Amino acid sequence: MTAGSLEPRDMEWLDKGVLGIQWNDGHHSVYPVRYLRLHCPCAACVDEWTGERRLKGEDVPLLIMVQDIQPVGRYALQFRWSDGHDTGIYAYSLLRKLCQCDVCQPVKPVESKSRRLM
Ligand SMILES: [Zn+2]
Ligand SMILES: [Zn+2]
């Protein structure tokens, strides 16, 4: 299987706000849509030069919804979001990296980010 031939075969709503994509290599991906919105790759959400993410968690409504999904050529999907954002083009290779299924994102041990001083 070469990287260029990866394509979604089927899409379905697994749950409210959880998109499932079945790929042509048999992988079944799971995407909470807010997670996808937060990882929007467009120039407004990510700095083109530094790759730094401009979009912050608080910028995206908790109850974000997908209003429309359009295929772009044979390499990407474009999402139209309920907050009016529609400039993000998610290449299939990016979507595979964002996959949140148990295989791609094994449950990580909870790590404490800050150490209390007292
Ligand atoms: Zn964006
Ligand atoms: Zn996966």
Image (cartoon, helix red, strand yellow):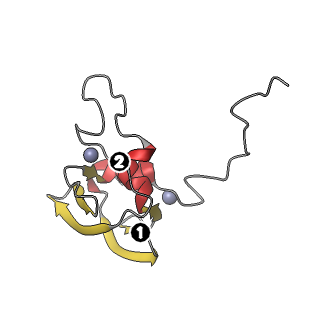
State the image quarter where residue 12 is shown: bottom left
Q: Which residue is mark 2?
A: 94
Q: Position of residue 27 (x, y in %)?
A: 46, 64
> What residue lies at 76% left-to-right and 27% top-to-bottom?
115
Task: Give the residue at the far right of this rendering.
Answer: 118
Tell me if mark 1 has few (under 14), some (14-19) or many (20+) residues whose alpha carbon lies within 10 angstroms of its own.
some
Instruction: Look at the image and tell me whether residue 111 can be seen.
Output: yes
What secondary structure is marked by label 2? helix
Name the quadrant of the C terminus. top right
Q: Amino acid at mark 1?
A: Leu
What secondary structure is marked by label 1? strand
Instruction: Look at the image and tell me whether residue 2 can be seen.
Output: no
Q: Position of residue 97 (x, y in %)?
A: 43, 48
Task: Give the residue at the far front of this rendering.
Answer: 118
Horizontal side, residue 90 vs residue 30: left or right: left
> Of the residues tagged 1 and 2, which is closer to the observer?
1
Name the quadrant of the N terminus. bottom left
Tell me if mark 2 has few (under 14), some (14-19) or many (20+) residues whose alpha carbon lies within 10 angstroms of its own.
some
State the image quarter where residue 22 is shown: bottom left
> What residue lies at 23% left-to-right and 69% top-to-bottom?
68
Horizontal side, residue 117 vs residue 25: left or right: right
Q: Which residue is mark 1?
A: 19
Q: Position of residue 30 (x, y in %)?
A: 47, 64
State the image quarter where residue 69 is shown: bottom left
N-term-proximal mark, 1 vs 2: 1
**CB atoms of marks 1 and 2 within 8 Å:** no
Cα–Cα gap, marks 1 and 2 = 15 Å
Q: Position of residue 32 (x, y in %)?
A: 46, 62
